[in-house]
Image (tube, helix red, strand yellow):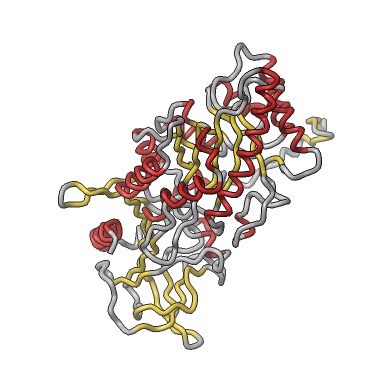
């Protein structure tokens, strides 16, 4: 058994007895494993040129986890104003933040420039907006500024998660007629544009597919630089942001593929990449294996010849699995109330969540040791894009999250997020009084007019 899996099982055994009516489900984060994965990444991408490894905030927007990454010298990739503020609040310096939102307002761009964070522009209109902002600024940006390029390649096995297809909402399509020359001109006309971004990989894509996307962008960067040297005597593009991540193995505890494997494939297929400064934006591969969900089994019933175990972990914590089970399957481990592995004979189970729709299932027709009311279930590999990104269907509360790390021979636990109370949930629904219309006034054409 892998070391992190042993640590996880010890954490589960230590927490299972704390499940209660008030808190029947909890998220767990292995803080040591996040450190270990980050160190593996740094070792795999050691390079003569500078490398900034950012963690994608969207994958695990927990303040304490991001703060831990900041103290380890990582950067942070953010895709919204909220994520940007969280990155700043948790200790990331502006020069180590990359702002990738696909829908930046003028205010967002102005704020990013003032803060000094790096920006990847989604389209030419956004670049033009930034030109107007710069015209009123005191100085040019000093951080990485670039255009997000869509290499327009074949999709991976999960079409909805493929970001570099022919028709994608992200970036500028490189293969569209006339676009390549427009991209080159955009860089040559702006001395402050010094990096290129590509979202090279996602779940469902092979390492070779990711490397192919990177190769297309490196070829573009080389072409821009050749032209820039001819015109200005210096290279324009100095940094390449290979956004996107590695796929994660959700079928066992094996951590695969490795960052080292990815590095070797990049060296083989696109060796010129390492002539540039690099930015990475891994998220899922850094965090997924660190997280687990532990839930009490509230009821077990038999319907249509199959046992249905109703738990408190469903669409609100594993949204993609509930809505797209074939694309996002997760393992379920059957445990006793004390968090020990069950050894009862296996039977077919559906493992259901608490939401009020029939598709709220974590597993369907799955052979598991016989589950009974009062047992617990563990859903591993959920540290990224699961309970850290709560979905408030049925006004289900955000679940509490505990972090743990090794401290000598014992595990030490940390509260990373409190349980959201029912009062908190109700407050989020807004005022509890019906709006009252003033009978003495009517609104005409957007203006208020008196009936007197």
Residue 231 horizontal side relative to residue 344, left or right? right
Res 399 visible: yes
Residue 418 horizontal side relative to residue 229, left or right? left
Residue 107 horizontal side relative to residue 319, left or right? right
Q: Residue at x 28, y 79 (%)?
A: 343
- 419 and 100: which one is in front? 100
Q: In which quarter of the image is the C terminus?
A: top right
Residue 371 point in image, percent of width and height: 35, 77
- 291 and 387: which one is in front? 291
Q: Is residue 66 above or below residue 419?
A: above
- 98 and 315: which one is in front? 98
Residue 28 point in image, percent of width and height: 34, 54
Q: Residue at x 35, y 58 (%)?
A: 23
Res 392 visible: no
Residue 306 point in image, percent of width and height: 46, 84
Q: In this view, does 346 lie above or below 225?
A: below
- For residue 366, what is the image quadrant? bottom left
- 110 and 266: which one is in front? 266
Q: Residue furthest left?
A: 409
Q: Residue furthest bottom?
A: 305
């Amino acid at each position: 058994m892998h070391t992190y899996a042993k640590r996880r099982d010890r954490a589960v055994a230590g927490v299972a007895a704390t499940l209660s009516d008030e808190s029947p489900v909890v998220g767990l984060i292995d803080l040591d494993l996040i450190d270990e994965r980050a160190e593996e990444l740094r070792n795999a991408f050691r390079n003569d040129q500078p490398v900034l490894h950012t963690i994608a905030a969207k994958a695990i927007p927990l303040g304490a986890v991001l703060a831990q990454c900041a103290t380890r010298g990582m950067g942070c990739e953010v895709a919204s104003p909220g994520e940007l503020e969280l990155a700043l609040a948790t200790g990331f310096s502006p020069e180590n933040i990359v702002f990738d939102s696909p829908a930046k307002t003028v205010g967002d761009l102005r704020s990013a420039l003032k803060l000094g964070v790096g920006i990847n522009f989604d389209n030419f209109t956004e670049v033009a907006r930034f030109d107007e902002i710069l015209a009123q600024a005191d100085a040019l940006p000093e951080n990485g500024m670039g255009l997000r390029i869509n290499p327009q390649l074949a999709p991976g096995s999960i079409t909805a998660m493929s970001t570099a297809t022919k028709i994608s909402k992200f970036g500028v399509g490189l293969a569209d007629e006339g676009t390549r020359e427009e991209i080159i001109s955009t860089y040559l006309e702006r001395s402050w544009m010094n990096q290129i971004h590509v979202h090279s990989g996602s779940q469902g894509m092979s390492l070779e597919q990711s490397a192919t996307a990177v190769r297309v962008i490196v070829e573009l960067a080389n072409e821009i630089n050749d032209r820039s040297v001819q015109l200005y005597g210096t290279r324009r593009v100095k940094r390449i942001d290979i956004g996107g991540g590695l796929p994660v193995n959700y079928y066992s505890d094996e951590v695969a593929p490795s960052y080292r494997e990815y590095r070797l494939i990049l060296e083989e297929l696109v060796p010129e990449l390492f002539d540039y400064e690099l930015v990475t934006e891994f998220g899922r591969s850094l965090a997924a294996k660190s997280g687990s969900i532990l839930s009490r089994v509230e009821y077990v019933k038999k319907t249509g010849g199959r046992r249905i175990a109703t738990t408190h972990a469903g669409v609100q914590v594993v949204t993609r699995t509930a809505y797209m089970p074939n694309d996002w399957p997760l393992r379920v481990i059957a445990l006793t109330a004390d968090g020990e592995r069950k050894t009862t004979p296996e039977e077919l189970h559906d493992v259901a969540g608490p939401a009020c729709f029939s598709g709220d299932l974590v597993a369907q027709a799955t052979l598991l040791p016989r589950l009974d009311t009062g047992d617990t279930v563990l859903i591993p590999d959920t540290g990224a894009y699961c309970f850290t990104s709560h979905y408030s269907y049925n006004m289900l509360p955000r679940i509490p999250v505990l972090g743990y790390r090794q401290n000598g021979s014992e595990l030490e636990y940390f509260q990373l997020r409190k349980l959201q109370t029912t009062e908190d949930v109700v407050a989020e629904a807004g005022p509890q009084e019906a709006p009252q219309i003033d009978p003495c006034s009517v609104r005409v054409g957007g203006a208020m007019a008196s009936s007197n």
